[in-house]
Amino acid sequence: MTGSTLRMLLALCLGPALAIGIRDAGAQAPLSNRRSAECVSEARPDRLQGLSPEGDLILASGPSARLSGIRLPDAPPHREQALSWLRARIGQPALVQGPDRRDRWNRVAIRIRSSGEAPALDWAHGLVEAGLALVDAGPDGVFCQPELLALEATARERRLGVWADDRYKPLDVNQSERLRERIGSFVLVEGRIRSIGERRQRTYLNFGGLWAEDFTIIIPRTTWKQMSDRGLGLDALKGRRIRARGILQSWQGTAFSIVIPDMIEPLESGRLPR
């Protein structure tokens, strides 16, 4: 399937959702309903006026923004290529979608589609498809674009953009020295879950038996509950080979936290439950 065909199919699937307004899901609504309220909102016309020195989007409507569900590369030349991709769309008519909730840098997380193209191009899709962005829903709280993972996988297979650079390729969890070199960076890791430790406040996915050296994924209680409710608990994960992504920290070896279940992907036959 070509990239343009895939974009067309995605646009056909996502287009109707952009016209649906947000409904109050209520504090006691099921998780699926609350997620729908976060992900489905009315699209509004806007334009990109420019980019901040940090690479944030400056919209004609006023607020600074970032594209939800993705992370731009952190090093040249790929970061400059991603920013050039965005600058090429300054002044073009667009549809913007997302809640008016600011992060600590006073930015809103949004989706943007070009409204002057047919089919309309979702900017996050375009960047990921070109290998100029990595999928990262961690800052968003919910993941509204699971199709981004498929687009990223295709770009990675084709070695486009960042995926031709060893810096961005997934790291094996057994390469402890390479992992320590990347502490503080957003990384993809791959490996087999050796054991799972369920505690009251968090769950630990362990990839080795040496706690002071090996890699661990830390999952908060609320996220582990979501995963278990979706059939993605202990029995589904133990012994599985997976790919995960996050900001690497120094913690009894190396570790990162995952708050979005979709940031864990299977690497063997069969799909993890959604």
Image (cartoon, helix red, strand yellow):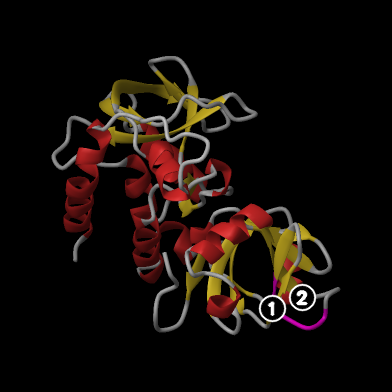
Q: Position of residue 198 (x, y in %)?
A: 72, 69
Q: Which residue is at a point 57% across and 79% down the rendered structure image? A: 235
Q: Identify residue for label 2.
A: 214
Residue 265 or 180: which is nearer the viewer? 265
Q: Is residue 50 above or below residue 180?
A: above
Q: Kindly tell me whether residue 162 is visible in this rendering.
A: yes
Is there a contact, CB below 8 Å, between mark 1 and mark 2?
A: yes
Q: Position of residue 229 (x, y in %)?
A: 51, 63
Residue 223 or 253: which is nearer the viewer? 223
Q: Is residue 228 magenta?
A: no
User: Image quadrant for the C terminus?
Assistant: bottom left
| Rendering quarter of residue 91 | top left
Q: Is residue 125 above or below residue 54?
A: below
- The tag earlier along the polypeptide, 1 or 2, is 1
Q: Which residues are magenta?
A: 205-210
Q: Which mark is residue 207?
A: 1
Q: Residue flagged by tag 2: what amino acid is it?
A: Asp
- Label 2 Cα crowd, 10 Å radius (few <14 / some 14-19 / many 20+): many
In what element is the residue under mark 1?
loop
In what element is the residue under mark 2?
loop
| Rendering quarter of residue 260 | bottom right
